[in-house]
Image (spheres, rainbow, N blue to C red):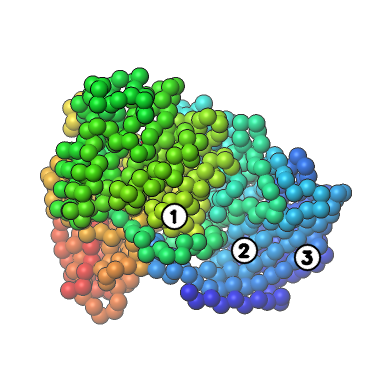
Amino acid sequence: MKRNFIASALLAAAFSAGAAGISSPSGNLVLNVSVNDSGTPTYSLSYKGKTLVADSRLGLVADEMGFADNFTISATDTMTVDRSWEPVWGEYSTVRDHFRELAVTFTGGEPSREMTVRFRVFDDGLGFRYELPRQDNANYLTLRDEATEFNFTADHKLFCIPGDYDTDEYLWSETSFSGLPGALASYTGHTESQRSGGNTIQTPLLLKTDGPVYVNLHEAALDGYPAMLIDVDSDTYSMRTNLVPDRLGVRAYLQLPFNTPWRTLIVSDDARDILASQLVLNLNEPCKIEDTSWIKPMKFVGVWWEMFTGRVKSWAYSDDYRAKPGVTDYTKIEPNGHHPANTENVKRYIDFAAAHGIDGVLVEGWNEGWEDWCSYKKNRQFLFDKPYPDFDLPLLRDYAASKGVKLVMHHETAANAVDYERQLERAFQFMKDNNYDAVKTGYVGAIIPRSEHHTSQWMVEHVRHVIERAAAYGIMVDSHEAPRPTGLCRTYPNWLAQESARGGEFESMGGNPPSHTCILPFTRLKGGPMDYTPGLFETRLSHYGEGKDSQAGTTLARQLALYLTMPSPMQMACDLPENYERFPDAFKFIEDVPVDWADSRYLEAEPNQYITVARRDKNSDDWYVGAITDHNARKATIDFSFLPEGVKYLATIYEDAPDADWKENPQAYRIRTVTVDSRTRLKQPLAPGGGTAMRITKK
Ligand code: NOJ
Ligand code: CA
């Protein structure tokens, strides 16, 4: 790792008793910090000479002590850092971490208190966090509020989802500060847990000014603290933090010294820079796992989609909802006969994975506990070491090993996180004993028995604990229904992926419009990779003939492009083997596409409309391109100047056929090859809701 620290007290910044300031390395972003008349710390941020965030308050409020007023600036400290680091996996093999830092210490009040706010100004944005050292008077805080504001200056565009303490599985609204109350009113799902009312939204969110300047607002390194939601004032264009509370209304219980997560603003007048930014990862701690050789990015298939087609309606072995895990002798109760986690079916998936070079097979419904999990009344307990009688684990373990395929474990907890913690060590040991290296976890439903919210401090700590214990066993994790990622995958790279947004499963429940995957990379993905589950080839659920009429908002070719535009080191090929066998030439792309990258170049991007990206494989000289559009047909411009000069490549292009259309003709695709070099510019047509994927190999 290359490190180069340059400490400097003489930055292009002005300091006086009540104010301090600093600019980003290029000077584009300028941060100013001061205290107002009541001694409340404030900051402002300008971009290219224009105010982006006007004077905005900073502070924390605890029962024992307030950290929001009666302060003066007692010290400032600055430094410039320019270093780089190598992620275990990701979009780039090397990440540059280049910023100017200003740490402002505020003291004062009676009894006296001290708080440092550490600001890091990068060329692509700002991060800041509160640091509370041990105090003379109180070191255990019952945090009631974080008073951080982001005061914007005009009625900017907003891309957001409703503020909900428990779920983020929503479609995105493209609205504005003034349009927000109406825009959110149309949401109907999950309203019982949307406790913070109409004008609260979640992060990561995206803003676009008239400029345009694009701003992604989120947080980094969320640990030991609740997730941040944002209260929006539609009249003043002000945003304010709203931390997820526990059932008693307490935001967090803190033991000092304590550093909060970073509040992050990724800023650029070029939308592509928002996608390329590594700011959130840069603000996380370096990798804590010493030997990472066992962390292996992977592709996997699974019985998963069978549940969603309507053909198989249950994860459970039996329809007898009275069956109790660990009590019922499952060999003595009637199997329902439509539960796909059975030995024969799983062998079929293993055979398919082996034949196509897919690393893993995920099996939902393999263990005791699914009979009554959805009623959430009696049996919200699963056993993580008790296979159902029709899942011959030793046989499948050995069969998978003989074929060079890994079984991927599934731990649905039905949100009984306390019980999961009790079983955790046994569950992970069971995995290792049976040759499993990766687990998909799940927290469907309201958290019991504590009545916590999914993104409260307690759950944030629970999930981090699971990741740490998994690392101790050499286990990789893909978590569903967990708090939205904030770049902790840098510190714990065994945390390969998360769901934490509306994923591909909704294609069977009303569908995701094509624009959905044109916004996720600007928002949710800035925290970390998503287990979106691309690879859907049969997009009409009516195909299965059992009453489902949902249709996915995509063409077949676009599903291939998602492997590039939704990068993840744990990538599913979600469809049924029989559907892949109908389109073997298209499936070849899924076989070939890597899940770990040496370099990435965003070629074109506009939130909610289109994304074109080129990526270089980490393990070869091959390049790949993915381009997607919303419901409008589009011509992507692909500029191949990312290729080395003077070298000829063969591009295999998987594209929408001329008459393709996500609604009317989703499976119309073509495959062609063209010779390209660094001077090639291709105008590539994309169908409505369509996309293109390319594999580019040296000739
Ligand atoms: C919801 C998850 O998102 C899905 O992927 C999983 O299969 C089910 N819960 C069951 O655990
Ligand atoms: Ca989910």
Residue 237 seen anywhere in this rendered image of the structure? no
Mark 2 vs 3: CB contact within 8 A: no
Inter-mark Cα distance, 1 to 2: 30 Å
Q: Position of residue 527 (x, y in %)?
A: 48, 52
Mark 1 and mark 2 lie on one chain; the one further toward the N terminus is 2
Give the residue displayed 37% in from the left and 38% down from the top.
384
Badge 1 is on which residue? 471
Q: Position of residue 514 (x, y in %)?
A: 33, 43
Badge 3 is on which residue? 75
Outermost residue to the bottom: 646
Element type at mark 3? strand
Residue 407 seen anywhere in this rendered image of the structure? yes
Q: Position of residue 599 (x, y in %)?
A: 37, 67
Would the CB of label 1 be found within 8 Å of ligand 1?
Answer: no
Judge from the rendering whether residue 131 lies leftward or rightward of residue 84; answer left or right: right
Give the residue displayed 39% in from the left and 47% down from the top.
428
Mark 2 residue crowding within 10 angstroms, few (<14) / some (14–19) / many (20+): many
Give residue 474's quadrant in the image.
bottom left
Amino acid under disc 1 = Ala
Badge 2 is on which residue? 120
Mark 3 vs 1: CB contact within 8 A: no
Foreground: disc 3 or disc 1: 1
Residue 323 vs residue 636, the one in the foreground: 323
Inter-mark Cα distance, 3 to 1: 39 Å
Mark 2 and mark 3 lie on one chain; the one further toward the N terminus is 3
Mark 3 residue crowding within 10 angstroms, few (<14) / some (14–19) / many (20+): few
